[in-house]
Amino acid sequence: MRHRKKGRRLNRTWSHRKAMMRNMVTTFIDLGKIETTDAKAKEVRSLAERLVTLAKRGPDDLAARRQALRVVRDKRVVAKLFTEIGPRYADRPGGYTRIVKVENRRGDAAPLSILMFVMEPVTFKEKRERRDDEFEEETPRKKEPEPERAEAVEEAADAAVDEASDGVAGDAGDVEGETAEAEAEATKEG
């Protein structure tokens, strides 16, 4: 079981996979788009989006720049990340990349994808004001019991109590029978 082990193995050792992801994300940030297999694109996307989030903190944030340099070892690419890409997505709350599926590879029929940065500006849906009567329509109301129905239910309950009190009085002693009869009379009156 692979509990708490996120990410795909991609049929590589840990060190090979780490080096490959570093190289791919460096190339992706430098060129703006890369073509690779679906699984690799999904892994690079998560790493690249984390780096863009670091870059949004601004070009003057030295700690963020050092965190990015731990992954991307090319200072020129990190400078591009913090001066061009970070400010471009300052207003976007995530989703900086897009994966577009293309045809399968000819040699082994592996599914290929193009990973690219999103260029469209972010658009938010406008929240419309709701009227008070709309809130009233949506809240479920409890149905009040109908008067005839309520009386029928009470009569059925009284009959059940009477039958139970007759059975208890016959099976048990006089004390229990008397209390059951007193309870039945109290429910009839109330």
Image: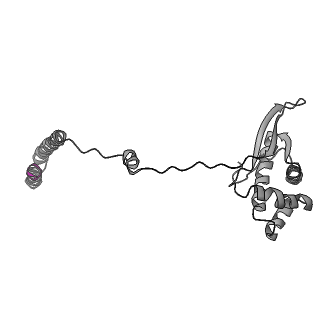
Q: Does the magenta run of residues contain 188? A: yes
Q: Does the magenta run of residues contain 171? A: no
> Whole-percent x and y of residue 30?
88, 52
In this rendering, is residue 56 above or below 153?
Answer: below
Characterize the magenta stretch by its predominant secondary structure: helix
The answer to whether any part of residue 74 appears in the image is: no
In the rendered structure, the answer to whether residue 127 lies left or right of residue 62 reads left
In this rendering, is residue 102 above or below 139?
Answer: above
Q: Nearer the viewer, residue 21 or 34?
A: 34
> Whole-percent x and y of residue 136?
36, 48
Picture residue at 48% right of the left edge, 51% below the top: 129
In the rendered image, which quarter is residue 160 located in? top left
> Whole-percent x and y of residue 71?
85, 59
In the rendered structure, the answer to whether residue 130 lies left or right of residue 74 reads left
Picture residue at 92% right of the left edge, 60% below the top: 76
Picture residue at 30% right of the left edge, 46% below the top: 142
In the rendered structure, the answer to whether residue 183 lies left or right of residue 146 reads left
The answer to whether any part of residue 96 appears in the image is: yes
Q: Nearer the viewer, residue 183 or 172?
A: 183
In the rendered image, which quarter is residue 111 located in? top right
Report the magenta residues as a range: 186-190
Q: Nearer the viewer, residue 159 or 84?
A: 84
